[in-house]
Image (cartoon, coloured by chain):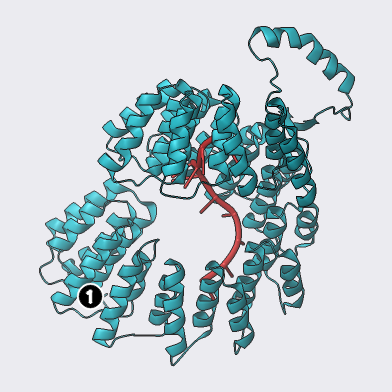
Chain colours: A cyan, B red
DNA sequence: GTAGGGTTAG
């Protein structure tokens, strides 16, 4: 019988710790991690080049970037693994500049990057406006003469492609000069072209490819779907040598977005294999277009199949509910969250807040918000915007103060909500103060959306001349929404000259909207200017616009009812009209008289 | 490298 060889004590401790650390970052339990960290420190292994990177990764996954940096700083001679883990930690916490600084620090200390360094680093650099960072990394790569394995230049292509038009053209140059290309290089390049809207070039490369895998086909398919060219997508889909679940889902998604739910359903039913994403697509597709019954029945079917939903499913469906006001389905989703004990992430709670707010339940939105143990900027922005929309500007503005007290810095979304709150409360001057504070205090350059809010604020407050001045002097071209906002204000205050001016612009910017023509014509008619009335009518006829009737939809216990003007198609039509007649005097009394002026 | 996903003005 042989005696088992005993590993020395330090080895078992170290091995145990290593195992514990690698296990820990899966459950993201911070207090456990801190305990392990203390043990490691006690064992004097905190600067061990193999343990320290694991600690850094674990802290990073627990969103404890500061602690990760502390671990790094305690190592006297950092190696490439250690630098890589810190770069990745910065990347995971969206600190792209810090990731790059770490990279430079690494070069300064004479540590050479390896095959893992660049992909981490480039992932950090590939956000919007990060083109310069990617270029700097590229320059360093050339300087060092190190491109590593094929996946290093491949991730460079990918990162360039995520940096807008200029990035895509840099990626192209790089792609052209690459000596070895694998299928991923081709796919990344084609995907970049698709994202940059250069579909023709993407197709050309796709046709030139020496060999294609299912990913190549799916990328191309997605390109047609994104441009809503479902005919081209379908042609390609038919030509595919083999279709996987992604190919089918892409098609289903395309048809739902194009509004062709029958076709989407047909393909969905034909799918040989369905997964969670496919179910999510079809349910959100129905929900987003207001088909409660179909959406709920599919949702029930999905649940009865025993499919466990994830964050993506919940968020997608709730967003679709918010879009079309499907409170019934929203509540249904909420009840299965409660029933299954699903742990709601911050993003799921944010989607819930938005759903409740957009479906008319501001109070419930507030309850969700107040019950959250962890909130991010989006949570604050969503609740502020939701309350503002419902006219509870006072609470919205109070929450804005609390948000700042909690250490959040407002962003462009926050100000949309704030300005909206001021508009609905009639706080014109206060709103102006907030508008000016954007750039002065927070370096946020107002975008067209903010000018839209400002114009609404001034316009509804009766200061139409100032509103018009803003439109004429703002740094961007006014679009249809801007003119439409101003028109909305005109309808409240009747300044005929301004309304004329606005509508003249509006019919140019958005000639498809027939209502604008009608309103312009009505204004001329009111002023007795029959010549211009005829002009407008003639223009309408020439362009071929017809006034479509507006429709209201109502979700009653899961059934959606649609109503149009003079509509008597509803089975209960007679009763509904009787009720309207009954309600009319009361409506008038409460100040809800119908307004027919200006259309 | 491919399909679903939280906050933008009327």
Kindly indicate the quadrant of the structure image that contains residue A167.
bottom left
Residue A59: percent from left, percent from top? 28, 55
Kindly indicate the quadrant of the structure image that contains residue A136.
bottom left
Residue A169: percent from left, percent from top? 45, 77
Q: Judge from the rendering whether residue A542 lies leftward or rightward of residue A314; answer left or right.
A: right
Residue A578: percent from left, percent from top? 85, 14
Give the camera-side residue of A45 and A563: A563
Q: Judge from the rendering whether residue A568 lies leftward or rightward of residue A363; answer left or right.
A: right
The residue shown at (69%, 31%) is A524
Q: Residues within 10 Å of mark 1 (few under 14, many from 20)?
A: some
Number of callouts: 1
Task: Indicate the quadrant containing the C terminus of chain A: top left, top right, bottom left or bottom right.
Answer: top right
Secondary structure of the residue carrying numbered label 1: helix
Can residue A121 be seen from the camera position used here?
Answer: no
Q: Judge from the rendering whether residue A80 lies leftward or rightward of residue A135; answer left or right.
A: left
Give the camera-side residue of A532 and A132: A532
Residue A317: percent from left, percent from top? 61, 44
Q: Which residue is mark 1?
A: A80
Q: Is residue A475 above or below residue A456?
A: below
Give the camera-side residue of A441 and A315: A441
Can residue A531 be seen from the camera position used here?
Answer: yes
Q: Is residue A375 above or below residue A233?
A: above
Kindly indicate the quadrant of the structure image that contains residue A91.
bottom left
The residue shown at (59%, 32%) is A499
Mark 1 — on which chain does it sit? A
Give the camera-side residue of A270 and A518: A518
């Amino acid at each position: 019988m042989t005696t088992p060889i005993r590993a020395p004590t330090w080895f078992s401790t170290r091995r145990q710790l290593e195992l514990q650390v690698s296990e820990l970052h899966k459950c993201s339990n911070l207090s456990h991690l801190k305990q392990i960290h203390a043990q490691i420190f006690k064992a004097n292994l905190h600067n061990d080049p193999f343990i320290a990177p694991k600690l850094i990764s674990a802290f990073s996954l627990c969103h404890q970037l500061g602690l990760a940096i502390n671990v790094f700083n305690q190592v006297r001679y950092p190696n490439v693994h250690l630098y890589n883990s810190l770069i990745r930690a910065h990347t995971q916490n969206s600190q792209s500049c810090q990731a790059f600084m770490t990279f430079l620090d690494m070069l300064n200390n004479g540590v050479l990057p390896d095959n893992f360094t660049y992909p981490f680093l480039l992932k950090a650099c590939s956000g919007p406006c990060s083109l310069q960072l990617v270029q700097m990394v590229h320059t360093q790569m050339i300087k060092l003469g190190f491109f590593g394995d094929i996946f290093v230049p491949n991730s460079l292509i990918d990162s360039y492609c995520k940096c807008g038009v200029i990035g895509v053209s840099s990626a192209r140059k790089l792609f052209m000069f690459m000596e070895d290309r694998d299928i991923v290089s081709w796919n990344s390049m084609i995907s970049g072209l698709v994202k940059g809207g250069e579909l023709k070039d993407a197709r050309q490369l796709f046709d030139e490819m020496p060999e294609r895998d299912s990913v190549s086909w799916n990328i191309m398919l997605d390109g047609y779907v994104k441009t809503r060219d479902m005919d081209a997508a379908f042609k390609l889909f038919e030509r595919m040598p083999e279709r996987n679940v992604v190919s089918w889902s892409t098609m289903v998604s395309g048809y739902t977005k194009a509004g062709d739910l029958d076709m989407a359903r047909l393909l969905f039913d034909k799918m040989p294999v369905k997964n969670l994403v496919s179910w999510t697509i079809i349910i959100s597709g129905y929900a987003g277009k207001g088909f409660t019954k179909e959406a709920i029945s599919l949702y029930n079917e999905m649940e009865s199949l025993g499919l466990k939903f994830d964050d993506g499913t919940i968020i997608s469906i709730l967003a679709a509910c918010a879009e079309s006001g499907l409170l019934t389905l929203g509540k249904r989703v909420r009840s299965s969250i409660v029933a299954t004990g699903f742990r709601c992430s911050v993003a799921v709670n944010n989607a819930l807040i938005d759903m409740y707010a957009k479906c008319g339940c501001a109070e419930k939105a507030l309850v969700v918000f107040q019950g959250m143990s962890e909130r991010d900027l989006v949570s604050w922005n969503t609740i502020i915007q939701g309350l503002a929309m419902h006219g509870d500007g006072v609470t919205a503005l109070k929450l804005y103060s609390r948000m700042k007290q909690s250490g959040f810095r407002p962003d462009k979304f926050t100000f949309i909500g704030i300005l909206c709150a001021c508009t609905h409360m009639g706080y014109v001057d206060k709103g102006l103060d907030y508008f000016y504070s954007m750039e002065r205090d927070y370096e946020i350059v107002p975008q067209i959306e903010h000018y839209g809010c400002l114009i609404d604020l001034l316009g509804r407050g009766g200061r139409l001349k100032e509103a018009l001045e803003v439109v004429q002097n703002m740094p961007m071209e006014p679009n249809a929404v801007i003119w439409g906002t101003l028109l909305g204000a005109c309808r409240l205050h009747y300044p005929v000259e301004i309304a004329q001016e606005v509508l003249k612009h509006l019919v140019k910017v958005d000639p498809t909207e027939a209502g604008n023509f009608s309103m312009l014509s009505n204004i001329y008619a009111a002023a007795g200017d029959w010549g211009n009335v005829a002009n407008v009518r003639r223009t309408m006829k020439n362009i071929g616009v017809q006034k479509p009737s507006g429709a209201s939809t109502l979700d009653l216990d899961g059934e959606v009812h649609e109503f149009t003007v003079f509509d008597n198609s509803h089975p209960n039509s007679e009763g509904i009209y009787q009720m309207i007649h009954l309600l009319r005097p009361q409506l008038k009394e409460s100040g809800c008289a119908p307004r027919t002026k200006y259309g």
